Amino acid sequence: MAAIMNSFVDATLIAADNALRTLLAPHRAARPTPQPPAELAAHPAALSDAERRLSGALMRVNHVGEICAQALYTGQAYAARIAPGAATADQERTARHLEAAAQDETDHLAWCQQRLDELGDRRSLLCPLWYAGAFAIGVAAGLAGRGVSLGFVVETERQVEAHLDGHLDRLPAHDHASRAIVQQMKDDEIRHARDALHAGGVELPTPVKWAMRAAAKVMTTVAHRI
């Protein structure tokens, strides 16, 4: 019983620490910020006020997406550690898989924040709300079992990939700095989906996928402005 309680407390402290660092601490990337090709970076084109506002809004949405990704992965890892049978090596391996993916999302957070600063724009005012909602969804997915939890990662990353494709279409053509960041984010999300699938992720039911798309639509619409 004591071992179970210690495991629960440890998992809760880890989740709380991740939440505080995501929402309050400066984000530091482990990788350099993606840069456009040298010939484009050497002669950056000035953005009009309208283009700057558009890029800022899109990067704010991307920043919120990464807040949600941190919360989802943290919630899923938390569930893996507190679920029945959580003491097994398989469950801990699942938690560590999710935390490794979250490290890339930390890079994305730092890159998006840096670009928002460069554009003179701000993050969403509702970040704590986004985090709380995504964390709850992550816990629910994690408690559904390892295959479903990893399948949730697969479907999430596929939807994020499509979302980032849309942003690449909408960003000003000469906002090469934002486009370089979004392209690297997209490449990372494709890898996360592939890794989760190979690790045992299962296909989610179609209604669940629809619900995920609907939730994402609400988030992107609101975060574009607030």
Image (spheres, rainbow, N blue to C red):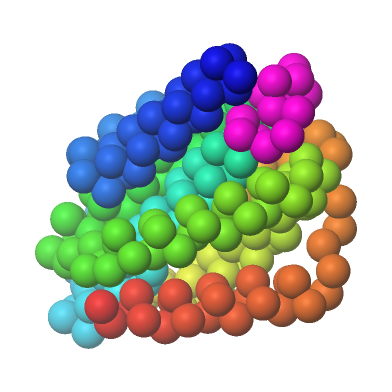
What residue do we see at 28% from left, 82% from top? 225
Position of the C terminus, as image quadrant, is: bottom left
Give above or below for 9 relative to 205: above
- Does residue 85 appear in the picture of this structure? yes
What residue do we see at 58% from left, 53% from top? 138
Residue 159 forms part of the magenta stretch: no
Q: Which residues are magenta?
A: 80-92
In the image, 103 versus 10, the foreground residue is 10
Q: Position of residue 172 (x, y in %)?
A: 37, 74
Residue 158 lies left or right of residue 10; in this view the side is right
The quadrant in which residue 156 appears is: bottom right
Which residue of the protein is positioned furthest toward the left in this rendering?
120
- Does residue 190 appear in the picture of this structure? no
Q: Position of residue 69 (x, y in %)?
A: 50, 52
Residue 209 lies left or right of residue 64; in this view the side is right
Give above or below for 37 relative to 176: above
Which residue of the protein is positioned furthest toward the front in this rendering?
1
Residue 53 lies left or right of residue 110; in this view the side is left
In the image, 171 versus 135, the foreground residue is 135
In the image, 186 versus 196, the foreground residue is 196
Q: Position of residue 180 (x, y in %)?
A: 43, 52
Give above or below for 222 relative to 41: below
